[in-house]
Image (cartoon, rainbow, N blue to C red):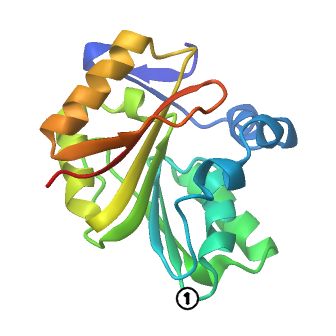
Amino acid sequence: MKGCIQHKDNDRICRFSPWRAWMLDNGIRRLFQNPKNIVGPYVKEGMTVIDIGSGPGMFTLAMAAMVGNTGKIIAVDLQQEMLDLVREKSEKQNMSSRIQLHKNQPDSIGISEKADFILSFYMVHEVPDRDAFLREVHGLLKPGGQYLIVEPKFHVSREAFEDTVEDAKKAGFRPVSFPGILGGRSALFTLAD
């Protein structure tokens, strides 16, 4: 894919462009992948939530509304330009006080705060070392918390997604369900007993 950085094992990280940012957050996409419908069952007022690979903030902003003034969203992205868009949008919507922005490194999320819910939407396939990534995410989830992975069907085959689920199990997660999300392959996890 043009504009993407190729890593080992064919993992890709797509560089920022205004077009890509628009593709990740626009009214048409929200119509088909409504954040409230997708994460609403898991995100409640007062929660701490981590949005890994937040992009321009489609899910970040929706979850910030859900957690209310007593909750917090940590928007994590590799690209500062995406985080800048989240900042701009959150300021316009008067939600910047509940959103913390964090620029991660390609090989590390780099935060230590524990979360009630963690989202990785359309990004796990871009991670250079999926095993290390999933172990790090495992360490960020509170007991009883939930972790939702959604991968794009147009990039990730069923077999590749099944490998991701197996890797998540090895990292200490237990699958809870496989929610139906238009255009995506998804799995909801909690910590294994």
Q: Quadrant of residue 149?
A: top left
Task: Judge by depth and name the residue closer to the eye, 143 or 133.
Answer: 143
Determine whether 99 is above or below 26 in the image. below
* Crowdedness near tag 1: few (<14), some (14–19) or many (≥20) residues, C-alpha within 10 Å: few
The answer to which quarter of the image holds residue 67 is: bottom right
Taking the spot 34% from the left edge, 63% from the top edge, the residue there is 145
Where does residue 101 sit, x and y in percent of width and height? 50, 67
Who's the residue at 76% across and 80% down the image?
94
Residue 98 falls in image quadrant:
bottom right
Residue in view at x 19 percent, y 37 percent: 169
Residue 135 vs residue 80, the one in the foreground? 135
Q: Position of residue 80 (x, y in %)?
A: 53, 53
Comparing 159 with 88, the one in front is: 159
Q: Residue at x 22, y 46 (%)?
A: 173
Side (left or right) of 82 relative to 94: left
Where is the N terminus found, in terms of image quarters?
top right
Q: Is residue 166 among the parts visible in the rendering?
A: yes
Q: Amino acid at mark 1?
A: Thr
Secondary element under disc 1, as helix, strand or loop, is loop
Q: Nearer the viewer, residue 135 or 5?
A: 135
Left or right position of 20 against 92: left
In the drawing, does residue 13 fall left or right of residue 152? left
Q: Which residue is mark 1?
A: 70
Q: Compared with residue 11, is residue 134 higher up or lower down, i.e. above or below?
A: below
